[in-house]
Amino acid sequence: MSERDEEQAGLVCPVPNDRYSRILLAHGGGGRLMHSLVQRLLIPAFDNPALRVGHDGAVLDVPQGRVAFTTDSYVVNPLFFPGGDIGRLAVYGTVNDLAMCGARPRFLSVGLILEEGLEMATLERVVLAMAEAARECAVELVTGDTKVVDQGNCDGLFINTSGIGVVDHERKVSPGSVEPGDVILLSGDVGRHGIAVMAAREGIEFDTTLVSDLAPLTSAVFALMDAGIEVHCLRDLTRGGLGGALVELAETANVGMTLRESHVPVSEAVRGACEILGLDPLFVANEGRFIAIVSKGDASRALAIMGAHAGSEAVAHIGEVLGRGTGQVIVRGALGVERPLDMPSGEQLPRIC
Amino acid sequence: MSERDEEQAGLVCPVPNDRYSRILLAHGGGGRLMHSLVQRLLIPAFDNPALRVGHDGAVLDVPQGRVAFTTDSYVVNPLFFPGGDIGRLAVYGTVNDLAMCGARPRFLSVGLILEEGLEMATLERVVLAMAEAARECAVELVTGDTKVVDQGNCDGLFINTSGIGVVDHERKVSPGSVEPGDVILLSGDVGRHGIAVMAAREGIEFDTTLVSDLAPLTSAVFALMDAGIEVHCLRDLTRGGLGGALVELAETANVGMTLRESHVPVSEAVRGACEILGLDPLFVANEGRFIAIVSKGDASRALAIMGAHAGSEAVAHIGEVLGRGTGQVIVRGALGVERPLDMPSGEQLPRIC
């Protein structure tokens, strides 16, 4: 009796894990099992008209103008951590990258790479978290792909999300728009995501529960944009942390920057953990923090708007853009001593996103 | 001496493999090494204005109307096989999915997941193959992401490509547009990709060299569209082969279909390999073949157009769309016996795309 006959005879339950508790290679094979995984788990979870068409891609109506397009793969280990999971991360992360381009996120794609033997219940949790995160961000998961690799050839579950957003204004939010004299605002305390994931992975317990800062940044960003703040550049702080983002931006825009270290908010818990582990919080990863580089004249208004916004109450004015041509970030330490900031060669904590 | 100092002192060669012959975890860490990999290998290889902006995503001008959006991850093993490689596959595969939506492919994203220890020379070969394939298909690789996972947690190299195409006509090319009475045309012989990859992986040698059918399908598709052929649905044959595609389409469109088995072109080499290995060529994967479901009145014109087109000279009229409501494919065998076609539960050959 083929699975199809069983299904027609009403023998198969409507969710896949009633039948298979683990992912098989055949779930990625383009046959009946993959079809069933897609039809019973993925399409109902992400339900929307584009997906129901059942074709090789989604055909979407996009308003005239510019669109933003971005991609990210997620390989975080462990899959679930305090304050989030790989599914939520994969949605917020790509939504945030679109917001950083000044684009309103609209559509996401989902590419799943599953390891043979992955528990179906784990996949379901991740998929449902993605669906919930997408609803929260008002984006639709319109097209997808599932591959399965043999046991030992992938670490449980990797996700790629790519996204399309709509740029509904004339401004150019990008490193090239950064101007000497601009101010650098940071939306909140840094380092919680990296430390929370690392602690979960290594089984380290701190006095206080450290929760990832993982969050969508769209509403804070569009509060700024909609208020007409002259936003020149935005950058969310992920791998490489605040320090990595500033160095990269200074180099790309070819401007000097100062960073007032004592103005950077760091929670007691992160400060303590970094001290114990010998990490620099400036370079620890975040997943719900961004910097906004805005014209000096708009600084206090931007601070007020961000500060009134859930998630960026701890906004801080952390630095300035200097002249063109140096491409360097200078850190002014608490004692007034200045030093150049450079990226470390790699991330202090691997597999955090 | 930091890598940056070395670079400034002129000690670092312009391509990364002169310095690191293998991928390190730090190449995915958001720090100096990742920056260098992106700046020295990826951006020069895929060079285009959107990529040079150096932001979290690409902002693109898209003409008014509908866009198609699709995603695919590629986990083929081995990375190089007769007739292609994972890089070329990742470009053509996503380009083909866009073409199947009736969209002209324009922009791709690239998400790389690399295994620590991967040879830099291997990555370079793959990246250069992607760049060449993109030029050939007139698409731009405008945004990307690189992750590195620790050794043993991914099989060398996985690639995700997502794509955006532009639908510059009013037609709706999708399963929902299939009409009873339509004819089913197949663009060439089936099964070469699956057998070629499998033979390369298992080290099996056949009498004749079997080369994958891997190819972009855009020009054949747009030859049909531009000639005004009433194309109702297109589907490229990948995992699951011709059989899988037909069963899926018949179910999605909820129509009956007939398949005349003797009309399906199969090369002598594939026929022989399938006989030895006990495989059904109807379900072996392809990466450069598609079916076009067109209105009956346009059948002979469509056959002529496809037949005149490099890559689809062996076009065949392989079946018809019957009435609505059954969702079943009936195969008419060489002896006139009819049998229902069903998908196998998984792919006969895993990791072929």
Image (tube, coloured by chain):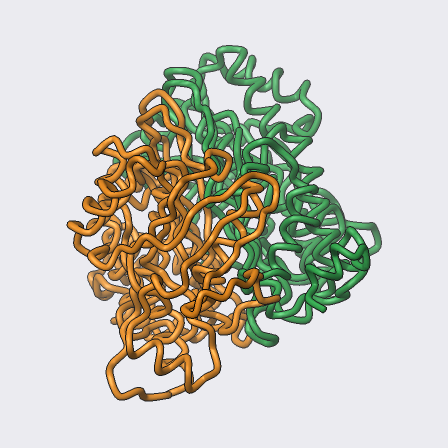
Chain colours: A orange, B green
Q: Is residue B58 above or below residue A85?
A: above
Give coordinates of residue B124: x percent, y percent: 73, 53
Give coordinates of residue A52: x percent, y percent: 28, 41
Residue sitting farthest toward the right: B207
Quadrant assignment for the C terminus of chain A: bottom left
Q: Is residue B221 above or below residue A161?
A: above
Q: Is residue A48 above or below residue B217?
A: below
Give coordinates of residue B156: x percent, y percent: 64, 65
Quadrant assignment for the N terminus of chain A: bottom left
Q: Nearer the viewer, residue A239 or A123?
A: A239
Can residue A92 be seen from the camera position used here? Answer: no
Which of the 4 image quarters holds residue A209? bottom left
Which of the 4 image quarters holds residue A264? bottom left
In the visual, does A277 lie left or right of B132? left
Q: Nearer the viewer, residue A19 or A263?
A: A263
In the visual, does A259 lie left or right of B13? left
Q: How many marks?
A: 0
Q: Residue at x 58, y 27 (%)?
A: B218
Q: Nearer the viewer, residue B33 or B235?
A: B33
Residue sitting farthest toward the front: A336
In the visual, does A72 lie left or right of A37? right
Give coordinates of residue B347: x percent, y percent: 51, 58
Can residue B277 be seen from the camera position used here? Answer: yes
Q: Residue at x 51, y 35 (%)?
A: A176
Which of the 4 image quarters holds residue A228? top left
Q: Nearer the viewer, residue B117 or B3?
A: B3
Q: Residue at x 42, y 87 (%)?
A: A276
In the visual, does A152 lie left or right of B196? left
